[in-house]
Structure formats: C-alpha cells, structure tokens
Amino acid sequence: MEGLQYAFHLFHSGGLVMYPLLALSIFTLAIAIERFGYYRVNRKGSKQFCTGISQAARNQQWDAAGQLCRKFPTAISRIVASGLSHGGDMKGMKIAFHEQMSVEAVGFKRYLDYLSAIVTISPLLGLLGTVTYIHSALFSVAAYTVIL
C-alpha cells in the first residue's frame, strides 16, 4: 500500500503535464492490445495455409487452393484468393495480388500514425514538465529571498 501511495505522490508532484502523459499511455496501451489481436488473427494457421497453398500450386489444384483460402480467413488468404479468381491469366493475377495487398496493408497500418505522434509528443511533454518544475522551483526560491 505504501508503494501505491508513493506512486500517487510522484504522479501528483509531476504537475499538470502528468495528466496528458497518463492519457497518452492509456491510449498507447489500447492501441497495442488492439494491434496484438489484429495481428494474431491474421497470423492464425499461417504455417498450415502456406504449406497447403504451396502444395496445391505445385500440383495445380486450384480448387483445393480456393478451399484453403476459405478455410483460413486471413489477409494472406484473401490476397491469394483474389489472384486465384483470375484463373490462369498471369498478368491479371499479378494485378489482383497487388490490389489486394494494398487493401490489406491499410488494415496492418491502422493506428500506427497515432503511435508515431505519441512517440513524438511524449518526450516533449516530459521536457515541458521538467522546465515547468524548474521554473516554479526557481520562482519559489526567488520569492523566498525577496521576503527575507
């Protein structure tokens, strides 16, 4: 219990700048949890899927490859499925792969701009807190010496 009180004391002595830092920390944690879940879902069964697709492509079993894409609903399976939808047309498959990869990349990059902004802002807020504390300490010392 004493450690928690000490943590609250430190937080309070940090001044007003600690509140935005706390909010940014909570926001960062929420993004990390959401991204972990998203990446985990899109990774689920990827080893089995890649092995199965590789074997199906080697044996030119396109129906089996399509079934694998439906069995594993991940980003990579959606990319492969979009290419398979163009049959044997290599140019069409490449274009479909590229288009679907662009669509899936948006999902993988979601919220990363927010993290980049937080990484930039947090040290500046810390510096602001330090400067504010030093300024208030110097002001207190100056006021004390004027009184004496």
Image (cartoon, rainbow, N blue to C red):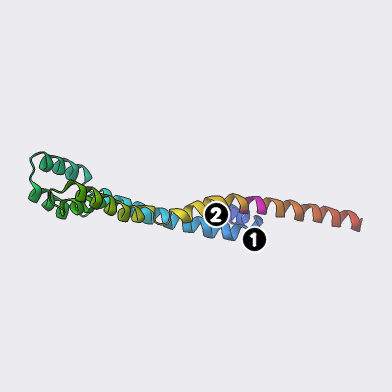
Numbered disc total = 2
* Part of the protein shown in magenta: 125-129
Judge from the rendering whether residue 78 lies leftward or rightward of residue 88; answer left or right.
Answer: right
| Residue at image point 7% right, 45% down | 61
Q: Position of residue 32 (x, y in %)?
A: 41, 53
Judge from the rendering whether residue 46 lies leftward or rightward of residue 55; answer left or right.
Answer: right
Q: Which mark is residue 4?
A: 2
Going from N to C along the chain, the mark reached first, 1 or 2, is: 2
Judge from the rendering whether residue 99 lies leftward or rightward of residue 51; answer left or right.
Answer: right
Judge from the rendering whether residue 85 lies leftward or rightward of residue 111; answer left or right.
Answer: left
Viewer-side residue, 45 vs 89: 89
Quarter of the image for residue 56 reads top left
Q: Position of residue 19 (x, y in %)?
A: 58, 60
Q: Which mark is residue 16?
A: 1
Q: Which callout, 1 or 2, points to the residue nearer the camera?
A: 1
Is the residue 48 above or below the residue 23 in the image?
Answer: above
Q: Position of residue 14 (x, y in %)?
A: 64, 55
Callout 2, which amino acid?
A: Leu
Q: Position of residue 33 (x, y in %)?
A: 38, 54
